[in-house]
Every structure is written in C-alpha cells, then in structure tokens.
Amino acid sequence: LNSYWAWQYILRSGTKYPDNIPDEAAKFPRMRFDEMHLKLNEKIPANTPIRLVKADDNDVPYTIDFIELEEVPEALTFDSITDENKILYTSDDGALQHFVSQYNGKTIFLPEGKYEVDGRIIINGDGTKIIGAGMWHTEIYFTASSDDKSTYNKRGIETYSSNVVLEGLYLNTINNKRYYNNDPVYQVGKGLMGSFGSNSSVKNLWIEHFECGGWIEGADNLNIQHCRFRNNYADGMNLAYGCRNSIVEHCSYRNNGDDDMASWSRADRLCENNVYSYSTSENNWRASALGFFGGKQNKAHNIVIIDPMEAGFRVTCDFPGMPFSNEGYSEFYDISVYKGGVASGTIGISGDLWGNQQGALHINSSSQYDLVNINIYNVDFYDSKNDAVFIGSSVHYIRNLVLKDININGTGRYGIYFNNPKGNGRYCNMQYENIGASSNTNTMPSSFSFTEDCSGVSVPNNKSPEIRLFALDGNLHIGGQQNTMVSVYDIWGRKHYHASMLTGPIIVPNLNAGIYIVRWNEDQTLKIFVN
C-alpha cells in the first residue's frame, strides 16, 4: 500500500485540472485515498476477527479508511467456455493488442494472470469478445508512462464495432494523473472509449487509474453491468455525444475525480433514453456522483450516493451542446444522498474547486441553454453539508421542473436554497427535518414560480406498493404478496436472495447492516435499511 496513485494537487488560481506534483503555497490537495485489492490464500471463516498490522519498522503513518471483504469467485477456464469460436491467448503469442487485431470476430480468452500491454487495444471486428478469468484473476496493465505526452494512444480499450463483449477483466495502468503537464490537449486515455457500435456488452470489469473509467460516444443499446469504476482522475462513466438506448447498472463508483455517472449531449449529438440504475457512488472528489447535461428522456434511478465532496447529483446547463428536449422528461428517482453538497468559501478549504457552493442536488440553468422538463421524485437527502437542494439561474431559464416526494433530513443550512432562479416548477410532498437554518428555505424570488401541485404533477403512478418490508436484527421480513418472484440486492448490486412468495411472508435472514433493494415483478423496487 502506497500513495503512488493517490494525492492530486490543484492550483488555487489557474487551471483546475489536477496533477501529482505538490506545491503547498500554490495548490490544494484532493484524492486523498487509493485502494489495493488482495486475494488471500484461503477463505476466512465467518465471524473471524480481522486485524491490520503495520509491519514496517518506521514512523510513517498509514490512514486506512475501511476494508471490504468479499468472496472471490473461482477463476473461469478456457475449457469452461462453450463458444466454438473461442481462441486462447498466452504471453507467448506476442503483444496482446496485436493478437486482438489479428482475430477479429473471435472469442479471445485471457487466462488468469497479469498481462503488461504497451499499446491501446483496438477492436475492429463485429462480434469480437475478450473474456478474462474474472476481475479478481485477469489483469491487463497498461505500461506506457503518462509522463510522455505522446502516449495517449497507448492505454485503454477502444472500439467502434458492434456486438462486442468484454467480460471478467481488471484494467489498470501506470498512469497517475488526469492529463500530461496539466494540458487537456494531452489526455492520458480512458479505460473504455469509442462508440461500441450497437448491441455491445460490458460485464464484470474493474477499471482503475485511467483518465476516465469509460467515455463512450455514439453507442446504441450498450449494456454495462456489474462493473467497478474506481480511483480514476476524471469521470467514472460518461455516455456522451449521441449515446442512446444504453443501460449502466449494478456498478460501483468510488474516489473518481469528475462526475461518476454522466450523460453529456456534446456538440450536435443528442443523448437519449439512457439509464443509470442500481449503483453506488462513494467519495467522489470533484463535480458530482451523477449528472445530466442536455439530452432527451435519460433516467437515473435506484442510486445510493455517499460522501461526495461537492454535489451529490446535478442537472445543469454548464456545457455546450444539445439542450434538454421538450419531449418527455429527464428523470431522477429512488435516489439517496448522504452528506452531499458544500458551502462556499476559501478555495481549497471550502466550496467546489472554485470555492462555490454546491447543493446535495444542484439544479442550475446556467450559461448554455434553458433547463427543461426535469422530473425528480422519491429522493432522500441525509446530513447535507450545506443546502440539500440548490435551484438557481444565470443567463437561462428553468421550465417545468418537478419535485415530488422529497425527504430532507439534516442540513448545514437550508432544505432548498433559491439562488435567483428564473422560470417555473412544481412540487408535491416536500418533507423537512433537522434543518440547520431558521427556515426550510430562503425567500424565493418573484422571477421563479414554484407552486404546490400534487394533482397535476406528471410523474408515474407511485402509489403505495402492495409489498411490505420490515427489518429487525439482521432479518428482512417481506410480505403483502403471493405468487410473486422477489429478489434482494445489496447496494453493490450483489444478489442475496431470489425466490417466489408462494403463500405468505418470507424472511431473509442474517443480513449485514446496510441498505438493500428489494425487487419484485421485474420492475418494482423498494429500498430498506437493515440494522
């Protein structure tokens, strides 16, 4: 464990892109943590105490924020793959990137091991599959140093082909900064990039230490599942520039240096009908855990956001490109945000990178276009560091903002802060508790019409579900349905239970404390905290 990939430093005055060169007088730090993962030689029995011991004989202090223990699946083998189109890669076959280019359309299997690669892997054939033994077993390590500005094209996996499959891999890199020499012209490469064509699939990938975990442009019907985007220097995943009909679900984002989950309708390409769901974000240290910037009918739901340094999630008009569509809604629902937002203050001590305030939910019709048709419902905010919800405008207007069933519990200041918004919105069932200011909101300006309207709010019918949940002493009781398939997931997207409620209530026993998602009838969900 060391700090090679941790600690980024940002100028107090000047460009806000971080690097790894400290300067106490001119810079302030972010990205205080990195993480390592270790496969043990044997399984730890249940209820065994775990102890960390510092073995170094020196006075250097270590701060361990947390450890996670999980059961590692058995490594996949070449013989277990039933695809007749399969082909085995070993280090004896030469550079991996050249091997992939020679076998377009094949199912390429990478056995357990670490593969050092000095160039980008480019997939140029429809139907190509790269399958590893599992994210704990097969590592692709990109070795080209980001201290050389010419190495942008030597990291990550890129494709514009369709029906591509990536599965069971850990992608890592020697890179330890966002850009070469703090210059965005010299990017250091994303873990995943290109369009991935149509109908491609990414599953069980662990991606760390790239500029972005993934930046996809122009995908259609891309499916990303059960991935981990952690410790990257910019976005976790961005579905940008015309991505459509794509789903990113059951993923973990941690310690990334820009929006964890984003969709930016960059330039002249509208992003539409994309979904982020059933995912967690932790310790995002710049921008937000989740953000939409323009687009049409994109959705985010069943998301847990924990300890963001700035906004929890945001919908703004900061970036140039295609605006929010007048057709349908961009939707955020079934989301929990813990300790989101930040108060304005001295750069490097408080506020975002510029010292500005950010709400745990940040809504701002700023510099590029109007903010139109935003639908936010069934959202919980806990212990927001400043304002739970920020609603503001600068040049442009907010039109048809909907807030419904919003629970705000604990704030440093207001439940809702109105920062000179212009336009209109509606709300229904706003709940406030433990508000830090003397009132739930500040004074709303006359330039913004924000009216209570439960009858006319155009949101899906969220009537009380016919399922009942109750948790006690690690046991989850589920009732109220019969002949219904029920699944229980933890916040990492791991399934803990799946069965049919045939005749009456069921009990899911021995759950660890935490947040769980109960799913039934394929499309119905509820969150519950098990103590």
Image (cartoon, grey):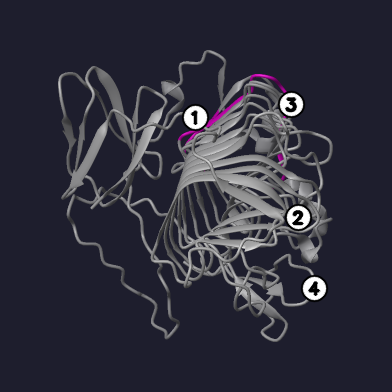
- In the foreground, 76 or 395: 395
How far separated are the C-alphas under marks 4 and 3? 40 Å
Residue 197 image position (x, y, % from top left) = 71, 25
Q: Amino acid at mark 2?
A: Ser
Disc number lying in front (2 or 3): 2
Q: Are marks 4 and 3 in contact (CB under 8 Å)?
A: no
Residue 237 image position (x, y, % from top left) = 62, 44
How far separated are the C-alphas under marks 2 and 3? 40 Å
Specify few, some or many for label 2: CA neighbours under 10 Å numbering under 14, 14-19, or 20 or more: many
How far separated are the C-alphas under marks 4 and 2? 21 Å
Quadrant position of residue 77: top left
Residue located at (31% from left, 72% from top):
53
Q: Amino acid at mark 4?
A: Gly
Q: Which region is colored magenta?
A: 109-133
Disc number lying in front (4 or 3): 4
Residue identifier under label 2: 366
What label does residue 200 carry, if any?
Answer: none
Residue identifier under label 3: 124
Q: Secondary structure at mark 3?
A: loop
Residue identifier under label 4: 14
For marks 2 and 1, the one nearer the N-term is: 2
Specify few, some or many for label 4: CA neighbours under 10 Å numbering under 14, 14-19, or 20 or more: few
**Residue 118 covered by magenta stretch:** yes
